[in-house]
Image (spheres, rainbow, N blue to C red):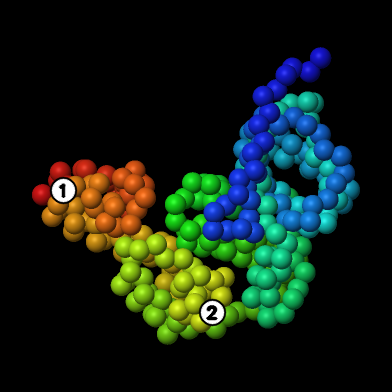
């Protein structure tokens, strides 16, 4: 008799990104017969093993392995030897991918992703960071920017389009205009939609341009501007709570996490050793 499992399956809708959901599966042991999805599923195994069969190709997936099920693609999921596993799956509406293909190629094009990506440490890290952002970030631009960049990587290196992606023309004027807007409003919550409207290009295209010309994402640029200003304010007021709120962070812990990541120490230690 099979031991009773505490299976937990949670579907998380993402605020500000209506075309995306994140499914969390913990201690899942069910077998799923051949079926299809209308959306695109990008998953990662976080514990245990899972067998996924697509196009007569069955692969045993381990922790940190990534799998992608394209829209309308028949597939089977099974648990080897009735053992449980855990995973995350990012579900994207197929129209979102078609729109990005339109942005990249200037025309509608079917994008088919590789079904299995194994032992790719960089992509695994990016996906885990993306999932953490989608589920936990209070900043819409962080979630959007990371999602756009991740999908572009998949299209560029793990799809049927990887050899045919055209170069795009840089536009320093557009990026300078966006940087000036961020510089003047970095205390406020800024979205990619807002920046793209100012720049006159789509959010996806703006994100590509900004990352290429500046070397970091729009969200990272915004956070760096906040942290640089916060260093000055911390030495004036000495109040971490006040500075975190003035700089537009959701709370003190949110501020401290970014401060330590960029400066290399906590706000408290920064005040202690620089007053």
Residue 165: name its quadrant. Answer: bottom right
CA–CA distance between discs 1 and 2? Answer: 41 Å
Nearer to me, 158 or 93: 93
The x, y position of residue 30, in whole percent, is 78, 32
The x, y position of residue 211, in whole percent, is 48, 69
Q: Which residue is mark 1?
A: 238
Residue 178: name its quadrant. Answer: bottom left
**Looking at the image, is mark 1 or mark 2 earlier in the sequence?**
2
Residue 147: name its quadrant. Answer: bottom right
Report the residue that reaches farthest toward the left.
275
Residue under the image location 63 percent in, 55 percent down: 20
The x, y position of residue 169, in whole percent, is 55, 83
Residue under the image location 46 percent in, 50 percent down: 137
Asked if residue 147 shows in the view, the reply is yes
Residue under the image location 76 percent in, 62 percent down: 112
Nearer to me, 222 or 105: 222
Residue 176 placement, left or right of 31: left
Task: Identify whether 160 is placed above or below 250.
Answer: below
Report the residue that reaches farthest toward the top.
1
Task: Identify whether 66 is placed above or below 247.
Answer: above
Task: Kindly identify which numbered label has been placed on residue 201.
Answer: 2
Verify CB contact (< 8 Å) between mark 1 and mark 2: no
Task: Kindly identify which numbered label has been placed on residue 251.
Answer: none
Residue under the image location 61 percent in, 58 percent down: 18
Asked if residue 267 shows in the view, the reply is no
Residue 272 placement, left or right of 126: left
Q: Mark 2: which secondary structure?
A: loop
């Amino acid at each position: 008799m099979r031991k009773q499992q505490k299976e937990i399956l949670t579907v998380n809708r993402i605020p500000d990104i209506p075309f995306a959901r994140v499914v969390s599966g913990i201690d899942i042991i069910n077998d799923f017969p051949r079926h299809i999805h209308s959306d695109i599923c990008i998953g990662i195994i976080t514990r245990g093993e899972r067998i996924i069969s697509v196009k007569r190709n069955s692969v045993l997936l381990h922790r940190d392995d990534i799998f992608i099920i394209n829209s309308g693609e028949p597939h089977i999921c099974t648990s080897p030897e009735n053992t449980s596993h855990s995973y995350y799956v990012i579900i994207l509406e197929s129209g979102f991918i078609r729109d990005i293909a339109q942005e990249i190629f200037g025309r509608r094009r079917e994008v088919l992703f590789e079904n299995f990506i194994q032992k790719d440490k960089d992509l695994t890290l990016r996906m885990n960071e993306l999932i953490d952002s989608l589920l936990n970030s209070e900043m819409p631009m962080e979630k959007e920017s990371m999602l756009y960049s991740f999908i572009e990587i998949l299209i560029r290196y793990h799809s049927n389009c990887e050899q045919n992606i055209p170069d795009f023309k840089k536009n320093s004027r557009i990026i300078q205009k966006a940087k000036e807007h961020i510089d003047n409003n970095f205390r406020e919550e800024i979205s990619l939609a807002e920046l793209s409207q100012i720049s006159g290009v789509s959010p996806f295209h703006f994100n590509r341009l900004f990352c290429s010309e500046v070397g970091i994402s729009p969200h990272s640029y915004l956070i760096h501007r906040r942290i640089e200003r916060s260093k000055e304010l911390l030495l004036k007021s000495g109040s971490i709570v006040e500075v975190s709120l003035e700089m537009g962070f959701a709370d003190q812990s949110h501020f401290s996490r970014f401060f330590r990541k960029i400066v290399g120490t906590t706000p408290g230690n920064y005040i202690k050793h620089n007053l």
